[in-house]
Amino acid sequence: MAVPLYMPRSVRAQCPNCGMPITVELHTIIDGAKQPDLKEQLLGGRLNLATCSACRHSGVMSAPLLYHDGEKEFLGVFLPQQLEVTEAERQRTIGEMTTTLMQSLPPEQRKGYLFQPKQFLSMPSMLDAILIADGVTPEQLQKQRAQLRLIQRLLDAQGSDDVLQTIVKEQDEALDYEFFALLSALAEGTLKDGRETEGRQILALRDKLLDMSSWGSKAGPEREILEQLGSVTTPEQLVDKMIETKDEELEPLVQLVRPALDYGFFQLLTGRIDAAAKDGQKDEARRLKVLRTRILDLTDKLDKMFEKEAKRASALLRKLLESKDVRASVREHKEEIDDVVLAVLSMNLQEAEKAGAKEASARLEQIWRAITEMLEESMPPEVRFINHLLDADFPQGTQHMLESNPQQVNGVLLKAMAAIAADLEAQGRSELAKRMRDIRGQAVLLA
């Protein structure tokens, strides 16, 4: 339970959806170290969330926010542009919030950094700074943003299993443990906020993706462990989970979270060992050392298995490179082409492009196209047709294709087109999304 250091104030507003009056408890000052619940709400985009009791519409209220973490000596402030205040009013507001914060702290905690709060122009930049102060790297932030964009694409496509399956095939490598842990955490946070319909939609999406994705299908019996890992989204929480895990459950857990067991994870675990030894907890320090050795042995075992698979994939890639007919060779080895082969091919293609090896890049690109073409053959007919439409000239070429294939132009096609346009828009590919909507407009007139 969060300590009510800085009492929120009740604010009356009007629901923008139905016009009914609503009340929200507005927090403007948060101490992250002392109010972890509020910090979690802030980072999850749920702080100052107002939900209309009449229509269930929800949204975050715009308000000034001062965020403090004394352990990190971090003080940040954000004033929404919607407030339209003058510079003098802005400085006065910041001064009042800072004074309120300082007065709540004991004298020995009133340090110099409190007189110079970092001012942020946007809430996302402030949240990034908070996470970086917590030890999250910019690369990790970038990966999480990409995961959130992918989740939104998948949620938008939930109405069409064919479109959903296409996105899963395209992004299969990204649907790993970390992705599913984030998805579970989002569902948990949404349900905790009382947004039951949205929370259940996210859980339904997770269950579908577990069945559709390579990682999910391999997880099989370990799905129960994934359920338990729903709230584990940081290295610190993962260390806690590993320490709590029963010995017989450790191996399947390590298999699930192998990508997250990096140098930073082992640094944190070693820190726990050192802290236990320093506090005189010899038995606990010894237990954690045994745990660290076991995890290292299990990761080494997994890495050797992957290395073996990678060698197999590399050998197959050499065969494909040496073949005279790439398309025929790809089909000949269809059963051997899996996620590992695609990962090795992608890695080699990127390296060739970086090195400027044009001949090698062209050959690898040819293999990639042949594999993509083969995979496309297993796609639903409407998705294949849409791909061909997007490659055709607009409007004459697309109109001709639509008129020449009247059996393809139906409600299923129109629904898939709408979902794909929404996916493209969510990816920031506005031009291609517009092209998809334009082609759909042609199809509507012929359906």
Image: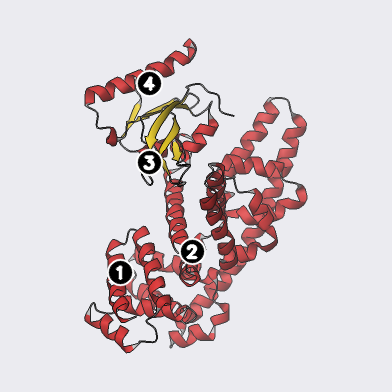
Instruction: Tell me which residue sits at (46%, 67%) in the image.
Output: 167
User: What amino acid type is highlighted by mark number 3?
Assistant: Pro
**Residue 97 badge:** 4
Residue 26 location (% of width, % of height): 43, 30
Colour convention: secondary structure
Q: Residues within 10 Å of mark 4 (few under 14, many from 20)?
A: some
Closer to the observer: label 2 or label 4?
2
Q: Between residue 447 and residue 302, name the one nearer to us.
A: 447
Residue 390 location (% of width, % of height): 32, 75
Answer with mark 2 or mark 4, whichever residue precedes in sequence. 4
> Is label 3 in contact with label 2 (beta carbons under 8 Å)?
no
Residue 196 location (% of width, % of height): 55, 49
Residue that badge 3 annotates: 124
Q: How crowded is mark 2: few (under 14 residues within 10 Å), some or many (20 or more)?
A: some
Q: How crowded is mark 3: few (under 14 residues within 10 Å), some or many (20 or more)?
A: few
Answer with mark 3 or mark 2, whichever residue precedes in sequence. 3
Closer to the observer: label 1 or label 4?
1
- Residue 369 appearing in the image: no
User: What amino acid type is highlighted by mark number 2?
Assistant: Gln
Closer to the observer: label 1 or label 3?
1
Closer to the observer: label 4 or label 3?
4
Instruction: Tell me which residue sits at (39%, 83%) in the image.
Output: 408
Q: Distance between the residues labelled 1 and 4?
A: 48 Å
Q: How far apart are marks 2 and 4 (CA)?
A: 44 Å
The residue at the far top in this view is: 107
Answer with mark 4 or mark 3, whichever residue precedes in sequence. 4
- Secondary structure, mark 3, is helix
Residue that badge 2 annotates: 158
User: What amino acid type is highlighted by mark number 1?
Assistant: Arg
| Rendered-image quadrant of the C terminus | bottom left
